Amino acid sequence: PGNQLPFDSSKKTLVVLGSGWGATSLLKTIDTTEYNVFVISPKNFFLFTPLLPSVAAGTVTSRSIIQSTRYITRHKKRVVTVIEADAEEIDPVNKTVTFRDSSEIKGQVSLKTIPFDYLVVAVGAEVQTFGIPGVQEHACFMKELSDAERMQKKFMDCIETAAFPGQSEEEINRLLHFVVVGGGPTGIELSGELHDFLEDDLKSWYPELASKIRITLVEALPSVLPTFSKQLIDYTESTFKESKIDIMTKTMVKEVKDGSVVLQMPDKTMKELPCGLVVWAGGNKGRKVTADLMAKLPEEQKNRRGITVDEYLRMKGTDGTIFALGDCSATSYAPTAQVAAQEGAYLARMLVQIAKKDALEKKLDSLEATIESSADEEEKKKLLEDVSATEKQMAKVKLRPFHYTHQGSLAYIGSEKAIADLPFMNGNFASGGVATYLFWRSAYLSTLFSLRNRTLVASDWLKVKFFGRDFSRE
Ligand code: FAD
Ligand code: NAD
């Protein structure tokens, strides 16, 4: 920092909403020379979501999986302005964004509107509860860093409460029953991590209670991990069986109460399961700011999954100045970090091309205006030559559509086992033991964004290996 070019009012303003996978990948890749860039996000950091279940189980610490956005933008050619705020309203006609400081401490100004030339909407998604009673009030989520921290505290509270003298057997069994709702990758990874915590640490520290701890995974569909191949689903289910994690498929959570979950069983009967903690990993839905923006373009934006974009990630129904990527958009790709990151990097390169095109268009306009006002034939001839040279340059600026390259899906399933659906090696790869485990870990480590994070996560893993997880409750 310090050597960066300052704000320049002659340059176009690019506003990026969000600091997650899509936005961060864009910020890392983009050449900011031709733009004044503003990043607006309620979190002033990037969160490495794949390791969130590991935070919940205490395998890695919170700080190891986040990276400040200012740290990411510090070496950009032109200074990037980072604003900690929630985007509240996007006006696609007047091209403005209104944002609010929704954090605890507020100054005199906490609401502001700024104009943009280009806008990238990368606000991600929020937890989908389907309006099921009690989910919001009684369940923990696994979406934000605060969710993982909260879950860990509640998890340990259940165990300590079960250890409270005089607790009845029935109450102990309830407190030590953990229910994970949703057999998607989030629910599976979390169950696997909790199982490791139990096996590696809790068995030694709470020997009288550990055997009573139960993990139940509830999934409405006929199988877990519907996007993975059959072989990997079977492998996961049998690993969970060995790990004594109960999988209840074709079972739907209908209500979450303080101390139990109400289930609709495969035969449609209802059953109430007592439990100490419910973790909701039932999927995602669009955010309000996204829905409000879409509602302004009702003709073109009808997809309930999110913003419809064209093959250049331009929001349909706008004049090509608003882009959307990642989980807030509805494309033919899965809502994953991998897709969001590739889209972000693509858009960064596209925006550089767009800046070139805009500059050449500006030059053409000015040349044409000079030609019109010029009386000198010799000068006109020269200007016309300039026009044709500029047009040739413009023709060379190519905007290529987005193309996604799938590198495979990977999930950790506990007991030092991981599953991988890879686009080579005949589609899928399932194995346990040290090799897959190391592969999983190194794959994650190499995708972690900075050397700082890699070092922190590797040292957390080492610490856990030597000293076990820290189970003290803050
Ligand atoms: P996000 O990364 O969610 O970023 C959205 C950003 O927008 C955040 O910075 C947020 O603070 C900000 N924001 C929110 N509201 C506003 C607002 N009003 N205004 C401005 N900014 C706002 N995918 C994989 O491919 N592999 C994995 O292993 C994997 N593991 C996962 C594990 C877990 C536990 C979870 C929850 C998800 C996992 N995913 C994984 C999915 C992946 O995290 C998402 O697909 C990815 O985060 C999408 O990127 P995004 O940029 O669209 O959204
Ligand atoms: P998801 O949408 O993939 O899975 C949610 C599951 O919850 C669904 O299978 C759904 O049937 C179930 N469900 C919903 N309501 C229910 C109810 N009332 N009762 C019982 N079951 C219910 O959500 P996710 O696992 O959070 O994943 C979200 C996205 O993030 C996906 O695109 C996923 O691929 C990605 N992700 C990837 C990884 C990885 O690659 N390792 C890890 C986590 C998330």
Image (tube, helix red, strand yellow):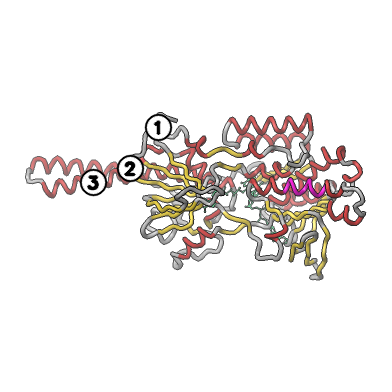
State yes or no: residue 350 in magenta: no
**Callout 3 touching callout 2 (CB < 8 Å):** no
N-terminal of the pair, mark 3 or mark 2, is 2
Q: Residue furthest front?
A: 108
- Given residues 30 and 234, the one toward you in this image is 30
- Given residues 241 and 86, the one toward you in this image is 86
Q: Alpha-carbon distance for marks 1 and 3?
A: 29 Å
N-terminal of the pair, mark 1 or mark 2, is 1
Q: Secondary structure at mark 1?
A: loop
Q: Alpha-carbon distance for marks 3 and 2?
A: 17 Å
Q: Label 3 sits on what residue type?
A: Leu
N-terminal of the pair, mark 1 or mark 3, is 1
Occupied quadrant, residue 9: top left
Q: Which residue is mark 2?
A: 11
Q: Position of residue 175 (x, y in %)?
A: 83, 53
Mark 2 crowd level (few <14, some 14–19, many ≥20, 10 Å Cα) = some
Mark 3 crowd level (few <14, some 14–19, many ≥20, 10 Å Cα) = many
Q: Residue at x 85, y 47 (%)?
A: 242
Q: Label 2 sits on what residue type?
A: Lys
**Can residue 96 be seen by looking at this rendering?**
yes
Q: Label 1 sits on what residue type?
A: Gln
- Given residues 216 and 371, the one toward you in this image is 216
Q: Which residue is mark 3?
A: 364
Quadrant in which the C terminus is drawn: top right
Q: Alpha-carbon distance for marks 1 and 2?
A: 15 Å
The boundaries of the magenta stretch are 151-159
State yes or no: residue 153 in magenta: yes
Q: Which residue is mark 1?
A: 4
